[in-house]
Image: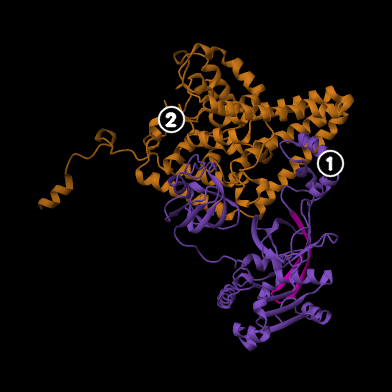
Chain colours: A orange, B purple
Amino acid sequence: MAISDVQEYTHLTDEEVESLGRELDDLRREIEQSRGAADAAYIRRLITIQRRLAAAGRITLFFSRFPPAWVAGTAMLATAKILENMEIGHNVMHGQWDWMNDPEIHSSNWEWDTLQPAEQWKHSHNYVHHQFTNVLGYDNDIGYGILRVTREQRWHPVNLGQPVYNTLLALLFQWGVSLHDLDLERIRKGQKDPKEMKRQLKQIWRKIRRQVGKDYVLYPLLTGPAFFSTLTANATANLVRNLWSYMIIFCGHFPDGALHFTEEELEDETRPEWYLRQMLGAANFEGGRLLHIMSGNLGFQIEHHLYPDLPSNRYAEIAVRVRDLCDRYNLPYTTGPLHRQYGQVLRTLMKLTLPNRYTSDDSPPPPPERLPKRRLDSERPGRRRETGMWSGRVSA
Amino acid sequence: MPAQFADRLPDLKRVRDVADKLTTPLHPDDYLSLLNPLWSARELRGRIEKVVPETDDAATLVIRPGWGWKFDYRPGQYVGIGVEVDGRFHWRSYSLSSPPLRDRRLLTITVKAMPEGFLSAHLVRGLEPGTIVRLAPPQGDFVLPDPPPGRLLFVVGGSGITPVMAMLRTLHRRGTMPDVKLLYSAPTAETMIFRDELQALQDAHATFEMHEQHTKVHGMLDLQEVDVLCPDWRERQTWACGPPGMLDAATEYWRAGGVEDRLHLERFSVELTGSGGDGGHVTFADSGKETDADGATTLLEAGEEVGIAMPFGCRMGICHTCTVPLASGRVRDLRNGEEHYEQNESIQTCVSVAAGDCVLSI
């Protein structure tokens, strides 16, 4: 069931919600104040590695008629694209590195290596998704306007095709994302301003031309006799990046533990309640350092949603603190190995192909009440009925 | 790529256009700067070649600028320098002390460590040769006209000598030193930046004369003395640069003398220290609209109140949609009390308030 009041759902008192908010604010301040040279070195190093990988991949593909070069070049290019989209682009556009005051690594002018124009991404993602996370009717990331990912979304016969849509979305992820800010839902309902839509489409078209021109025309032409093999290599690199980012992103809010909310929750929502909603609405996954870097540290989805603009390389240490907080406040903390999280996503997608009555709900039970209310007499051990020595002594 | 190359070779522009399409969404310079940090014109860069001590607390930074830098600045102009300290770029402006010399490919600024200024101290003592810094194009109208007037007077206090030095070096280099008088105040002879060079200039040019005022010994220069030291001061074009008190006094004196229009001033901003006030006068540069905002009104609200279509999103500091460059002044982030005052730093208007007067670039 979608949650209409996070506080009630988590059984926290007003004071507890307040103090939870304070602790999270303090943690934010602590990380902000400790940002420094080591963090700057981290992002610079990553950017350098990514650009070298991209350059090396492009150069290797000049020899792509030779199969090992095709494989090596494709692998390097795919890795570079993944790093750029996930750990660099997504996070820079969130403003995670704005504190460095370096216009070359700044949310206001970063453009990323995918079809979606940065400006539209920042609106649909940084604002709409991060502010209204998992609120039904507000957050377009709940199924992206094409999938039914939660039981609260009404079933429609169109959902029968869900396995097909899901596969197509995975394969063509960057194309799907490029249309995200158009807001398919609103277009369907005829609520979209046609002028705004035209402006957005023009912007998308310009970006598509540049991106497609580079990967599917210019580089293949440049490699001359290797035209066709470079073309397939670039297409493969884009495909690998699509599949990978699709999987990571679907593990952020669609596994079983990630909950949804109704618009009542937004009414008079305080900052601590916003924090609570972020914690309940996101799901982490576990893995080593390399996996986290390759997934833009989105395995720390909960931490990312609490602090979308703190540097991603700090999420691991923030996670330790957030987990401890969840233990103390008796809050759920959804995490698991990547394969299990994605397995849950797939199962949900398949189940929701059908109307609710044919399938069972997999969302976890709400947290138990922590401080049980006064127990009934029948729940206590039996008490002595005779007055015995007590009454004897008093009367003596 | 340097503009001067592009001018000379129009083909290079075509090459660059193609390169642009290959490196999109990045720029060719983003890759070239991996080979040599100076090969990028996205942000002007420079490499510190040498740090030459001038006095106990002043040093000259010799900088080799990267692509995009133009040596056609005018003597007396200042330049912005951005230095990374603990992961963050900090910007200050300093007068160029070098004459605009194209062939040497180097520029110099001379910095005096201020007691409270952590950045100036870092520049004087903490910069290793080889450090890459950012540069902002030269600007300022405290400049020597071309051709220079026949008779000049410079009134200088402390590190105010730096823009004047660029002018004197330019005059010297051209070999046409007009009639120049320099009244130079500093605490002692040892703290006088460029003292040796100025004395050498005096020996080389009969038309150049310097008066040294060691304020610890002789006290401050009383402007009445100008009548004695330079009796024809009213007829001279005068350039004055130094501490605010000195400049205010000079303005007053020249006004009283009825020749205020011959006085050119450079108020080099003292490094901001301490905390700003609560609230202040907010100016929105593009529209010219202004308003007074208290210490609880966010800059976003202040802008909306005077009818500016401010960009905004979450209004709670998470989405960075509302960021706007701070042209000047000081603002405070309500979440942590941190103050921002770097020129052109992007600030989040939805969680920032004025901490003194400020100007936003919107």
Q: Which image quadrant for residue A234?
A: top right
Q: Position of residue B306 (x, y in %)?
A: 44, 47
Q: Relative to residue A326, is residue A224 depicted above or below?
A: above
Query: Residue drawn 84% across and 72% down?
Result: B175
Instruction: Name the outermost residue toward the left.
Output: A395
Q: Relative to residue B132, is residue B224 depicted above or below?
A: below
Q: Which image quadrant for residue A198?
A: top right
Look at discs 2 and 1 and give the one toward the viewer.
1
Query: Residue drawn 55% across and 46% down?
Result: B323
- Label 1 neighbour load within 10 Å: few <14, some 14-19, many 20+: few
Residue with the mark numbered 1? B10
Q: Nearer the viewer, residue A223 or A358?
A: A223
Element at label 2: loop
Q: Label 1 is placed on what type of residue?
A: Pro
Q: From the viewer's perspective, tell me whether residue B251 is left or right of residue B53.
A: left
Q: Nearer the viewer, residue A235 or A384?
A: A235
B52 within the magenta span: yes
Q: Position of residue B227 (x, y in %)?
A: 64, 84
Residue with the mark numbered 2? A261
A39 within the magenta span: no
- Label 2 neighbour load within 10 Å: few <14, some 14-19, many 20+: many
Q: Relative to residue A84, is residue A42 depicted above or below?
A: below
Q: Label 2 is placed on what type of residue?
A: Phe
Element at label 1: helix
Q: Which residues are magenta?
A: B45-62
